[in-house]
Every structure is written in C-alpha cells, then in structure tokens.
Amino acid sequence: MVNKVIVITGGSSGIGKALAREFGKRGSKVVITGRRLESLRATAIELKNENIDVFAFAGDAASPEDNARLAEEAVRHFGKIDILINNAGVSMRALFQELDTEVIRRVMEVNFFGAVTLTKLCLPELIKNKGSIVGISSAAGFRGLPGRTGYSASKFALNGFLEALRTELRQEGVHVLTACPGYTASDIRKNALTKDGSPQAESPRDENKMMSAEECAAHIYKAVKKRKALLILTWKGKLAVWMNRFFPTFTDWLVLKEMEKEKQ
C-alpha cells in the first residue's frame, strides 16, 4: 500500500480515523473527510505528528456538491485516487411506528446515496488505477434489526449496490469489498438519530465490550490488501447472517432477545 492514495469518508473519528492511521502507517497517503471541522483538524494534526501524509477535507457525505469537490481536491492534492473507503455513516434507534420518516431519508442520504455519489465521481480514477472500492456496511445489511429499520434498509441497499458493482467492474480489474464490522466501539450509537431526528447522545450498549476501532481497521486493511469480496467481523455478526439464511423465524426471536438487552 506504499504511496497508494486512500480517500476515507467519516475519517475524523472511530473506524474512519483508525483506517487512516492503519493505511498511513503502511506508507499510504490518506484523504480524510468529515463534517465536524474541529475534529477533522485535530485528527489531521494527530496523523501528521505520526509522519502520515494526510489531507483533510471538510464536507458532508450526503452533499453531492461536497462529494464532487472532494474527488477533485483529492486528485489535485495527491494526483490520483487508488482506494475509496465509503465509511461515513449515521445510525438511528426508534420503533418504526413512532418514527418520523424523514429520519430514514436522512440515514439513506448519508449511508447509501452519499456512497453511491462519491463512488461514481471517483470511478474514472479507480478504473484507471485498478483500485479498490470499500463500503463499510454491517450485519444489519443482511439481517434487519428491530429499532433500526432505517439503518438496516440503508445497509441492505449498500450491500446490493456493492455486489452489483463488483460484478460490473470485474473485467475492469477494480476490487470491491463489502466490510461488515459488527459492534465496534465508536460514536455512531451516541450520534444515532431518535424518532424525531435528534441524536440520542448516550450509547445504549457497553462500548467497552466491543471490538476496538483499531482492531477493526487492521482486519479491513488486510481484506483490502488481499482484495477480498466480503468481510464479516465478530462471531455474533457471522452467526446472525448464517442463522438468518437457514432459520429466519428462529433468528427473529434471537435478534429480538439480543436487542431487548439495550437500555430503554
């Protein structure tokens, strides 16, 4: 990965930041983007202090205009794009019967349409360099989760998009990876949208019992290097996908029991 140019959305914290560090310490040049300017700048300084060649771009993953400028600036700054990691994402947590459907629209704009738009914009570079497209998805893209209807829908859509794209680009030499981290310690649950679109502020789960963002990033780095098609992390994630395929009704019960462990 030496001198490869990696574009990472949602790169100022969590898995995105860990990916920037993982690729950067292997000699890659990284472009990180995010909406929170202070956090983005702090992350860029932190990575530069570790001798990582990083370029920070402030932008919203849901904005087509910001995505267009991001693709242009990445090429202008580093001269090319080798790997695109669509990591930016937002979750939600509410029962569908109580949910404002605008929340689902917002989740889809970030998790799905943002990834689609940026992938399209970066595609000429990725084809030219026979690069990689990575989508940070979830086991929720294979098995819907109660209280996460909008999030699950966005990840199912992302999985289908990546699978179709992988098939289309096979003869172009472009690698496409669907990466499903499972529960990973990050701010995604604190920033998850509630029924009215406001962030829930507090994680309903014990973050200390989850896989670290750094461990997750190391697995994704290896999967990109090996040009794998699918990566499902954690035994719970793998079990949920397998059980849902063969025993869907029983899996409904198991998933509900698991989600009932959450606060409120």
Image (cartoon, grey):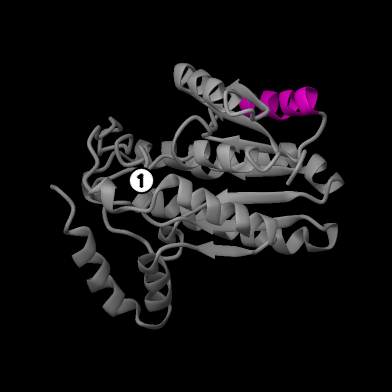
Residue at the spot x=29%, y=78% of the render? Answer: 249
Query: Is residue 193 rendered to the left or right of residue 174?
Result: left
The percent coordinates of residue 96 (x first, y second) are 27, 50
Residue at the spot x=42%, y=70% of the render? Answer: 238
**Between residues 245 and 209, which one lies in front from this camera angle?**
209
Q: Which residue is mark 1?
A: 185
Any magenta on residue 63? no
Whether residue 119 is situated above or below residue 31 in the rendered picture: below
Whether residue 17 is situated above or below residue 157 in the rendered picture: above
Q: Would residue 59 be seen by someone viewing this image from the given angle?
A: no
Q: Quadrant of residue 243?
A: bottom left
Residue at the spot x=38%, y=75% of the render? Answer: 244
Query: What is the magenta segment's predominant secondary structure?
Result: helix
Q: Would residue 245 be seen by someone viewing this image from the given angle?
A: yes
The percent coordinates of residue 46 (x first, y second) are 52, 24
Any magenta on residue 75? yes
Which residue is farthest bottom?
246
State which region is magenta.
64-78
Report how many numbered discs are placed on residues in the image: 1
Which amino acid, mark 1?
Ala
Whether residue 193 is situated above or below residue 246 in the rendered picture: above
